[in-house]
């Protein structure tokens, strides 16, 4: 179970990383990225940063590689913004929740379409 303090830290890290990427990171491979969530380990030594990219999958993979290449820079900038003893090690991962939700919506639409076709045949 995560504490309120940990949730607040995750929110602050999410906002600060978004700002660093938007205003300080100069890598064109990153493109349009949204930081959707941050999960910090209980000892605050690791943080998994979930993100989504505008565009197709190859574009997202290139952006993810660029973020992981720049994670040392992002972490050092983050350490200057945070008021904690140790800045967590960062790992960037693609957030697939929106993609999964879209896929579920497509399946539901197909089911409704099939049921509509069955009713029309009766």
Image: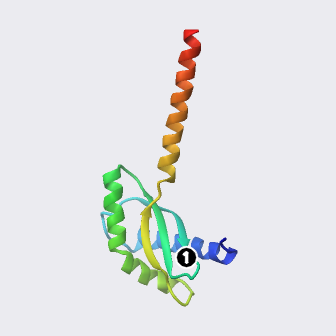
**Is 54 situated above or below 43?**
above
Residue found at the far right of this picture: 4
Residue at image x 38%, y 76%? 71
Residue at x-position 51% and y-position 74%: 16
- Secondary structure at numbered mark 1: loop
Whether residue 4 sits left or right of residue 32 in the image: it is: right
Circle 1 Cα neighbour tier, 10 Å, few/some/many (<14 / 14–19 / ≥20) = some
The answer to whether residue 102 is above or below residue 111 is: below
Q: Residue at x 52, y 22 (%)?
A: 114
Q: Nearer the viewer, residue 41 or 25?
A: 41
**Circle count:** 1
Question: 104 or 71: which is nearer to us?
Answer: 104
> What residue would you read off at disc 1?
41
Residue 84: give x, y in percent of width and height: 56, 87
- Residue 110 place in picture, x, y as percent: 51, 29
Q: Position of residue 96 (x, y in %)?
A: 47, 54
Which quadrant of the view contains residue 21? Answer: bottom left
Q: Is residue 7 left or right of residue 87?
A: right
Q: Check the image and name the residue furthest to the top.
A: 122
Q: Residue sitting at 57 percent across and 21 percent down? A: 115
Q: Quadrant of the N terminus?
A: bottom right
């Amino acid at each position: 179970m995560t504490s309120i303090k940990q949730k607040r830290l995750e929110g602050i890290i999410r906002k600060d990383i978004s700002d660093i990427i938007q205003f300080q990171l100069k890598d064109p491979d990153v493109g349009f990225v949204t930081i959707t969530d941050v999960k910090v380990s209980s000892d605050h030594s690791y943080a998994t940063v979930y993100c989504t990219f505008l565009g197709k999958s190859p574009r997202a993979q290139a952006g993810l590689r660029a973020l992981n290449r720049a994670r040392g820079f992002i972490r050092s900038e983050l350490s200057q913004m945070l008021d904690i003893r140790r800045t967590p090690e960062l790992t960037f991962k693609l957030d697939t929740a929106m993609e999964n939700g879209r896929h579920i919506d497509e399946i539901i639409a197909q089911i409704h379409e099939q049921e509509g076709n069955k009713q029309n045949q009766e």
